[in-house]
């Protein structure tokens, strides 16, 4: 399990498959400093090693070497400076492969790693057995009750609440394409102004894309794709919309103030921010483009009612 430690307060952080770093709250490792970019960098597992990718404005200092817009393989003992201050300096203390883990909701520094097969947790008078079923999905058994664990969801075991992270690379027998084909994209409108909450589900993976401006474009394209599927159109003809159609659907009153650049910018932001999430890279290209036309290129779409 990859672990980094803050050199000032000795706080240890377990690395996620894609561990984003930056000053904004949506990052996994938040470093609130003016010289740290909103999305400063990403630590990710590739092959059999951890790699750091700097995509900041000011760069990152790694073992006294300035790195800017570069990929750097991480080794145990390396010092990484995300900002000028000591509280933003981290040491790599473990470069082991990522593993599933449970993180205490009340104290994120308390982490329990899960083994490759099964393990027991004793919390108060409660005993919990964690194990993988035949489909390699993690289950938690408390007496007569067994629940399937979904990544980033919260579960109460005894008197303690834990957040589960799958944090496991795909097995060699599985392909990204297979997982993508099995996934379902859920759209939920959360305001009358056209704000949309988007979530992707695949097996026991749940990727929450939250609420963003560009999700309105995704919802418009997904609606057309769903309509064309219901009409029985051939696969190659489904879902396509001209830029003008999308702009009209976004806001017909301000059609004259919009241009294709606006759509391009929003699609770029969707791809960039989705790639920064765990499992996000395989879902960052759901929008297909072709000579002034675009479509939501995924058939498993579901619009859910507001909660």
Image (tube, helix red, strand yellow):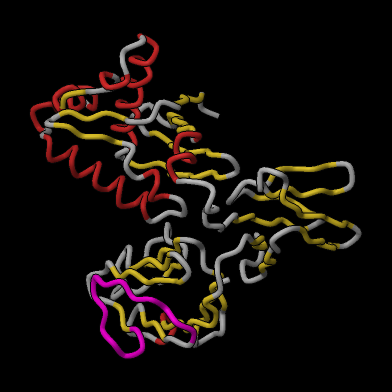
Depth check: give the residue in front, 104 or 275. Answer: 275
Q: Is residue 72 magenta?
A: yes
Residue range corresponding to the magenta coloring: 62-76
Depth check: give the residue in front, 98 or 146. Answer: 98
**What's the residue at 20%, 34% (across, down)?**
289
Relative horizontal placement of residue 289, taking residue 52 as reference (left or right) = left
Which residue is situated farthest in the right direction here?
125
Which residue is situated farthest in the left direction here?
256
Q: Quadrant of the C terminus?
A: top right
Above or below, 158 against 259 in this view is below
Q: Quadrant of the N terminus?
A: bottom right
Image-quadrant location for residue 126:
bottom right
**What's the residue at 76%, 55% (across, down)?**
130
Depth check: give the residue in front, 160 or 221. Answer: 221
Q: State the image coordinates of residue 2 (x, y, percent, origin top left).
A: 54, 73
**What's the residue at 30%, 70% (across, down)?**
54
In this figure, what is the number of numbered marks? 0
Q: State the image coordinates of residue 66 (x, y, percent, origin top left).
A: 26, 84
Above or below, 147 against 96 in this view is above
**What's the residue at 37%, 34% (across, down)?**
195
Relative horizontal placement of residue 8, taking residue 114 as reference (left or right) = left
Q: State the image coordinates of residue 247 (x, y, percent, origin top left).
A: 18, 27
């Amino acid at each position: 399990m990859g672990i980094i430690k803050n050199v000032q307060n000795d706080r240890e952080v377990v690395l996620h498959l894609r561990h984003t770093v930056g000053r904004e709250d949506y990052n996994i490792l938040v470093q609130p400093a003016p010289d740290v970019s909103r999305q400063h960098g990403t630590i990710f597992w590739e092959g059999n090693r951890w790699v750091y990718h700097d995509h900041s404005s000011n760069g990152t200092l790694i073992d006294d070497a300035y790195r800017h817009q570069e990929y750097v393989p991480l080794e145990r003992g390396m010092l990484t400076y995300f900002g000028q201050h000591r509280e933003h300096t981290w040491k790599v203390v473990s470069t082991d492969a990522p593993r599933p883990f449970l993180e205490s909701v009340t104290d994120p520094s308390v982490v329990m790693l899960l083994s490759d097969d099964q393990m027991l947790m004793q919390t108060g008078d409660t005993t919990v057995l964690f194990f993988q079923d035949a489909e390699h999905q993690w289950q938690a058994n408390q007496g007569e009750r067994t629940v399937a664990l979904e990544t980033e969801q919260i579960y109460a075991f005894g008197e303690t609440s834990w957040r589960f992270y799958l944090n496991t690379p795909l097995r060699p027998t599985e392909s990204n394409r297979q997982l993508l084909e099995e996934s379902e994209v859920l759209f939920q409108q959360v305001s009358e102004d056209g704000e949309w909450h988007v979530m992707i589900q695949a097996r026991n993976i749940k990727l929450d894309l939250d609420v963003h401006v560009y999700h309105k474009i995704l919802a418009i394209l997904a609606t057309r794709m769903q309509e064309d599927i219901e009409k029985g159109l051939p696969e190659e003809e489904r879902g396509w919309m001209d830029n003008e159609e999308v702009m009209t659907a976004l806001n017909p009153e301000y059609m004259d103030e919009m241009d294709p650049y606006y759509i391009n910018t929003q699609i770029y932001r969707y791809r960039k921010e989705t790639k920064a999430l765990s499992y996000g890279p395989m879902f960052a290209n759901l929008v297909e483009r072709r000579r002034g036309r675009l479509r939501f290129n995924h058939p498993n779409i579901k619009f859910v009612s507001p909660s």
